[in-house]
Amino acid sequence: MTATTTPDATAAVRLVVGLGNPGSRYERTRHNAGQRVVEALAARLGAGRMVDRYAGRFTEVRGPSGPLALLIPTTFMNDSGRSVGPAAGQLRAAPDQVLVVHDEVDLPFGVVRGKRGGGPGGHNGLRSLDVALGSRDYLRVRLGVGRPDPAFRGDTAAWVLAAFSEPASEVDELLGAGLAMVESVLEHGFDAAIATHHASPPGARAKARAERREAGTTTTDDGSE
């Protein structure tokens, strides 16, 4: 029997990337959901202060399968590859050893899904990574932020650059589900993680969300109208 680094026979993740835009202006926007998950992961792993490196915030910790690097690009989203490419190269991390956490408009709010490879689907941050890594074979944890509400005045680009309109408690659940999947990938391997952590919002929350959309009312991430 051949030894493997993870239970599902894939290479251990060497680099976890949280996509987002830099600065307080974007901190609580939908586009920064991936960044917030990796910040939470860094805290969970006791990473301490992240340092400025690879055009991003960077730290190295001990993960469940060995050395693990965490990176939050401080380029703007569309130029994320300028950060991730050099980091992956220096760490000698193959594409399937890079786990990228990002927002996903093609998933309903609250749904978290894993994906191995595939196209960027209109996500410019992923498009930048495809070029920088020379591959689409990296691993992804996709955080569902949904498409614009009927009452939202703006296009999809404006939607992801806006603050969450869902209650803060539901946003916290989304980010928590994303963190749980990332931790499961690190501990059990990617295939095992996606088999057990494909989480959908409970029926009561989904119903409440639908009712708010129909009524055209929104609540900001801090709970205000």
Image (cartoon, rainbow, N blue to C red):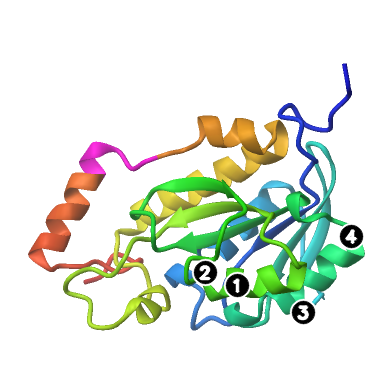
Q: Which residue is mark 3?
A: 55
Q: State yes or no: residue 119 in magenta.
A: no
Under mark 1, the amino acid is Arg
The answer to whether residue 91 is left or right of residue 103 is right
Under mark 2, the amino acid is Asn
The answer to whether residue 13 is left or right of residue 180 is right
Tag nearer the camera, 3 or 1: 1
Q: Does residue 192 appear in this view? A: yes
Under mark 4, the amino acid is Leu
Residue 123 % position (x, y): 51, 71
Q: Please tell me the numbered disc located at residue 127.
A: 1
Q: Which residues are magenta?
A: 200-205
User: Which image quarter: residue 19?
Assistant: bottom right
Describe the element under mark 4 as helix, strand or loop.
helix
Q: Which residue is mark 2?
A: 32
Distance from Cα at disc 3 to Cα at disc 1: 18 Å
Under mark 3, the amino acid is Ala
Q: Residue at x 89, y 60 (%)?
A: 91
Q: Please tell me the numbered disc located at residue 152.
A: none
The answer to whether residue 204 is left or right of residue 59 is left
Sequence-first tag of 3 and 2 = 2
Residue density around tag 1, few if under 14, some if 14–19, many if 20 or more, within 10 Å:
some
Describe the element under mark 3 as helix, strand or loop.
loop
Contact check, label 3 and label 1, Cβ < 8 Å: no
Sequence-first tag of 2 and 1 = 2
Q: Compared with residue 142, is residue 225 higher up or lower down, i.e. above or below?
A: below
Sequence-first tag of 1 and 4 = 4
User: Which image quarter: residue 187?
Assistant: top right
Q: Please tell me the numbered disc located at residue 91.
A: 4
Describe the element under mark 1 as helix, strand or loop.
helix
Sequence-first tag of 2 and 4 = 2
Contact check, label 1 and label 4, Cβ < 8 Å: no
